Image (cartoon, rainbow, N blue to C red):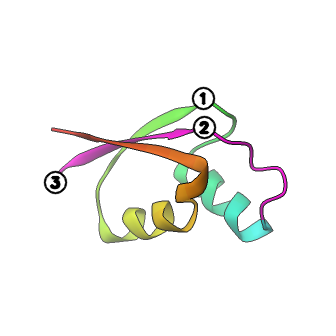
Amino acid sequence: MAKIRIEQVKSKIGSSSRQKKTLEALGLKRISSSVEVESTPQIEGMVKKVSHLLKIEKIK
């Protein structure tokens, strides 16, 4: 499977509690934190819900 790098670029302040929990489930805790994860349908759905707070980069 392909991997993606997800970086939080905006604050979660003002977001709904559901969006905050989604960021936490992705492993993002603060601005500029990043994680590399497998690109599964579940992860892609989570990223789509909070895409306005993230920067996504595909890794080969």
Query: Which callout, 1 or 2, points to the residue nearer the camera?
Result: 2
Q: Which residue is mark 2?
A: 9
Magenta-highlighted stretch: main secondary structure? loop
Q: For marks 1 and 3, give the CA distance.
A: 25 Å
- Give x and y (percent) for residue 20: 72, 58
Q: Which quadrant holds the N terminus? A: bottom left
Query: Which callout, 2 or 3, points to the residue nearer the camera?
Result: 2
Under mark 3, the amino acid is Met
Q: For marks 2 and 3, give the CA distance.
A: 25 Å
Left or right, 2 with respect to 16, comes to left
Residue 15's place in the image compared with 31, above or below, is below
| Contact, mark 1 vs mark 2 (Cβ under 8 Å) | yes
Under mark 1, the amino acid is Ser
Left or right, 35 with respect to 23, comes to left
- Give x and y (percent) for residue 32: 60, 29
Mark closest to the chain's N terminus, 1 or 2: 2
Q: At numbered mark 1, what does the secondary structure look like: helix, strand or loop? A: loop
Taking the spot 52% from the left edge, 57% from the top edge, the residue there is: 51
Q: Which residue is mark 3?
A: 1
In the image, which disc is placed on residue 32?
1
Q: Which quadrant holds the C terminus? A: top left
Label 1 neighbour load within 10 Å: few <14, some 14-19, many 20+: some
Q: Which residues are magenta?
A: 1-15
Magenta residue check for 12: yes
Taking the spot 65% from the left edge, 52% from the top edge, the residue there is: 24
Under mark 2, the amino acid is Val
Label 3 neighbour load within 10 Å: few <14, some 14-19, many 20+: few
Q: At numbered mark 2, what does the secondary structure look like: helix, strand or loop? A: loop
